[in-house]
Amino acid sequence: MEKVFLNQPPALKNLIGQKEIALPETGINIEIFYSQDNASQPIITKMARELNIDCIILGGEMESYKNSPLGSIIINIPNDEFNNVRKYLDDKNVIWKCFELDEEFLGRGEIC
């Protein structure tokens, strides 16, 4: 079940729908996924401190699955910080993707 949530195949997206999120006109929107492996880690705050960047938290959801949190948070970062953020998340083995309401681009090494 956790892998299905993290990969979110089209059938799952159709079933659960997509929430309306107000996206900023500038910056890059990134969805960070939390699983049993990283749910108790302060990924976003540590990243902001270590990279010395500001980010906007746009929304997210956390659920309990087998007594462990499972969910995602969408953040907005400045365009010029994307490569640093991408490297940070990849180095920490965090599953992420660029997020847009109309289209989504897979993370983990893909350019948004």
Image (cartoon, rainbow, N blue to C red):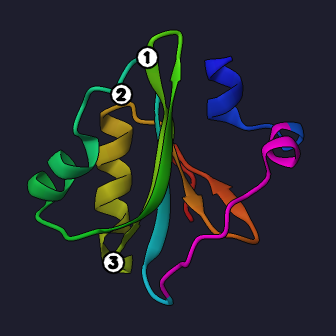
Based on the picture, tell me whether residue 76 belongs to the magenta stretch. Answer: no
Which of 103/11 is in front? Answer: 11
Q: Secondary structure at mark 1?
A: strand
Going 47% across and 60% down the picture, which residue do you hit?
59
Which of 29/60 is in front? Answer: 60
- The crowding category of the residue bearing disc 2, from other C-alpha atoms within 10 Å (few below 14, some 14 to 19, many at least 20), is some
Tell whether label 2 touches label 3 (CB within 8 Å). no
Tell whether label 2 touches label 1 (CB within 8 Å). yes
- State which quarter of the image contains the N terminus: top right
Q: Answer whether residue 49 is visible to the viewer in this image.
A: yes
Based on the picture, tell me whether residue 20 belongs to the magenta stretch. Answer: yes
Q: Position of residue 79 (x, y in %)?
A: 38, 78
Q: Secondary structure at mark 3?
A: loop
Residue picked out by circle 3: 78
Q: Is residue 91 left or right of residue 54?
A: right
Q: Is residue 63 left or right of residue 84?
A: right
- Residue 22, placed above or below residue 59: below
In the image, which residues are magenta? 12-24
Residue picked out by circle 1: 68
Q: Position of residue 36 (x, y in %)?
A: 43, 18
From mark 1 to mark 3, how far is it between C-alphas?
A: 31 Å
- Give, as a three-letter code, the residue at label 2: Ala
Which residue extends farthest bottom?
A: 25
From mark 3 to mark 2, how far is it between C-alphas?
A: 25 Å
- Give, as a three-letter code, the residue at label 3: Pro
Residue picked out by circle 2: 39
Discs 1/2, front = 1
Q: Position of residue 77 (x, y in %)?
A: 35, 71
